[in-house]
Image (cartoon, grey):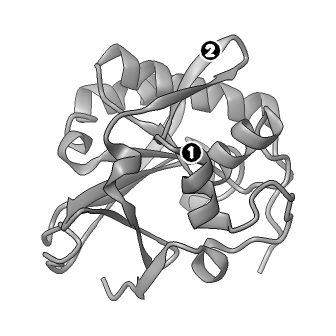
Amino acid sequence: MAKEPPLDIAAGRRLLFDVVDLLERHDIPYHLEGGTLLGLVRDGDLLPWDHDLDISIPASDIARVDFARRLELRLKFWRLSLRRFAADAPEHGWRAGQTRILKIAKRHLVFGRGWPRLDIFAKYSAAGRVSWVAKDRIMSVDERHYAGFDTVAYQGRRLRIPLGVEDYLAAKYGEWRTPVREWDCGKDEGTIVADFKG
């Protein structure tokens, strides 16, 4: 497998702000997620060894990132692709055909590989939990983290983060204050509850 290209922090910031601007302009709620959240909260910047950017949107709002809004990103030379669920999982809150993830990458990159890339995870609520899929794993946290939002300062902006962010990061990463360069959310993530079958 080819090694991931090095992170271009400036390009990553442009993509992050393009997407956040679009979401805020259309009043679509979001939270920073994964390594993007960890880097901004712990280090005050994007992680230079991360492979992509991560945001989450409540499943009830993901459909609002519709064609017109996608077109806005296309005009800025970003390519979008959508993945949907093939089967129902009522215990996690989703049905077949609903959006699982929206992937954004530079238009010229083949199959979404290369930098920068951004994943928007659809977050589904059921039975007091919020669940999503990443790296063929179902992940879940207490819904209290998504009952609103806090913010983190970054490059003169205030970006949205989950409530109780330190507890949230501890659930995901364990000892999150110590940098770990080799991390695979499909194996190391503390919020994994099951394998994802499609």
User: Which of the pair 145/131 is nearer the observer?
Assistant: 145
Which residue corresponds to mark 1?
A: 165
User: Which of the pair 169/37 is nearer the observer?
Assistant: 169
Question: Mark 2 packing: few (<14 Cα in 10 Å), some, or many (20+)?
Answer: few
Q: Are marks 1 and 2 in contact (CB under 8 Å)?
A: no
Real-space Cα separation, disc 1 to disc 2, in angstroms: 18 Å
- Residue type (three-letter) at the residue carrying disc 2: Arg
User: In the rendered view, does 35 fall on the left or right side of 2?
Assistant: left
Front position among marks 1 and 2: 1
The x and y percentages for residue 132 are: 37, 65
The x and y percentages for residue 19 are: 49, 29
In the figure, 93 relative to 121: above or below?
below
Q: Is residue 82 visible?
A: no
Q: Which residue is located at x 18 percent, y 68 percent? A: 127
User: Which of the pair 27/127 is nearer the observer?
Assistant: 127
Label 2 residue SS: strand
Going from N to C along the chain, the mark reached first, 1 or 2, is 2
Q: Which residue is located at x 19 percent, y 65 percent? A: 126
Label 1 residue SS: helix
The x and y percentages for residue 27 are: 29, 20
- Asked where in the image residue 113 lies, by quadrant, the reply is bottom right
Q: Which residue is located at x 69 percent, y 11 percent? A: 156
User: In the rendered view, does 16 fall on the left or right side of 20?
Assistant: right
The x and y percentages for residue 168 are: 54, 55
- Residue type (three-letter) at the residue carrying disc 1: Val
Q: Which residue is located at x 55 percent, y 41 percent? A: 107
Q: Is residue 174 visible?
A: yes
Q: Quadrant of the C terminus?
A: bottom left
Which residue corresponds to mark 2?
A: 157
- Asked where in the image residue 30 lies, by quadrant, the reply is top left
